[in-house]
Image: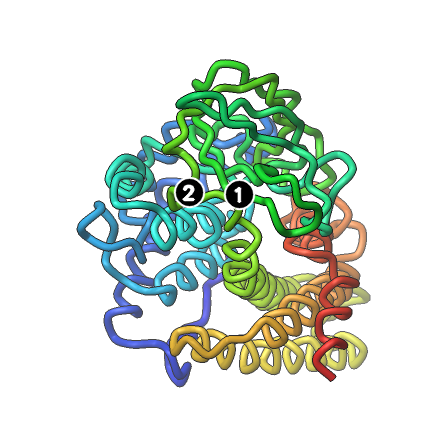
Amino acid sequence: MTSIPDLGGDRPWMTDDLRIFREAARSVLCREFSPHFARWRSQGSVDRDAWCRAGAAGLLCPAVSVLYGGGGGTFAHDAVIAEELEYTGIGMGFSVALHNAMVVPYLERYGTDEQRRAWLPGCATGEIVTAIAMTEPDTGSDLQAVRTRAVRVGDDYRITGQKTFITNGQLADLIVTVCRTGPETGGRGLSLIAVPATAPGFRRGRNLEKVGLRASDTSELFFDDARVPVWYVIGGVEEQGFRMLMEQLPQERLLIAISAVAALERAVWLTIEYAHGRKAFGQPLFDFQNTQFLLAECQTEAEVARAFIDRCIERHLKGQLDSRTASMAKWWSTEKQNHVIDRCLQVFGGNGYMADYPIAQMFVDARVQKIYGGTNEIMKMLIARSL
């Protein structure tokens, strides 16, 4: 792994405490997790005990209140972990960032105190791995078309439906599931229900084979009249799910953008290192003007992307990040991630197409970033509505 430049210097949201946290996170990721990543990619999932090791190292739920076993930090700590996962070559293949900043916030922000006490401490230790189940076979970015239905029968919900493309689906102990509990169509009538993997009638399908992110287990989930206690509805109130989703999606999209920028930065560093060490026609690749021009352009794009995303992080920490800006960040940064990594791979020549080279892994991992969290076409539609 190439050395990672210090990015803490003039970043507006970085503090001394966050720099210390970053160094600690980088050290434990390099020592405890990076050595196993090739095997995880081969087996199609991380080891289950990796989650408990991540919890013991303080990598889980850093922004959750200490009252519930978390680190008592802010989204800045989630952002640092998301970046360090990319910088150390693990990336979104180990879905810590999704657990920390995409799923757990539903439990902490909207959950009842009983729900927080029941679930959050386990989320922080790694004893409870979470997933969020939105997508269905006939429903992707259009959440208002969700068909999975939960019907109350006495003290239980009976849930019927199917979800697909669910990250952490094979390992998750608790799945925040988008269900239709009311008769209304569209966003009305949607609720979020936490479904434990032990629920009668719940079963996991295949661990889906993907082009990239191969260490991340991604599953079909089936709810065959699955029984869940009524108190598992998030917040204790039905038909608030769509509002909760809309409020949390900007943070989800910002997190995707953060990982995208960190990945393209790593791609540039790896390529600069390779270009200096690899020779062609008797001289280093870096000495060719074409290589210099390409890397100059990629480095500039990386620094522009970094400035934009740092501004978005700063705004989010102040509670000022709106859906429009988050959509811009997600669309633009993931497009740049794919563009820059593709250009960097070209410098590696045939080696860049070999699966054991990090740049090749980054190339296939990057593609899905333009799809999940709302496709980039949807992002542009959301931006256009504000014009």
Mark 2, secondary structure of its residue:
helix
- Tag shown at residue 372: none
User: Is there CB contact under 8 Å for labels 1 and 2?
Assistant: yes
Q: Quadrant of residue 348?
A: bottom right
Give the percent coordinates (x, y) of residue 179: 58, 37
- x 61%, y 82%: residue: 304
Res 266 visible: no
- Image quadrant holding the C terminus, namely bottom right
Task: Identify the residue under disc 2.
Answer: 234
Q: Is residue 274 left or right of residue 60?
A: right
Residue at x 62% of width, y 22% of height: 222
Question: Amino acid under label 1?
Answer: Ser
Image spot of residue 129 (x, y percent): 41, 34
Check disc 1 and report its element: helix, strand or loop. Answer: strand
Q: Earlier in the sequence, mark 1 or mark 2?
A: 1
Which of the pair 44/297 is nearer the observer?
Answer: 44
171 lies above or below 271: above
In three-dimensional space, the C-alpha distance between marks 1 and 2, rounded to whole angstroms, equals 8 Å
Disc 1 residue crowd, few under 14, some 14–19, many 20+, Cα 10 Å: many
Q: Camera-side residue: 229 or 269?
A: 229
| Three-letter amino acid code of the residue under disc 2 | Ile
Using residue 12 as the reference point, say whether residue 179 is left or right of it: right
The structure residue drawn at horizontal position 57% and vertical position 80%, both measured from the top left corner, is: 308
**Badge count:** 2
306 relative to 100, above or below: below
Query: Which residue is the site of mark 1?
Result: 191
Left of 199 or right of it: where is 271?
Answer: right
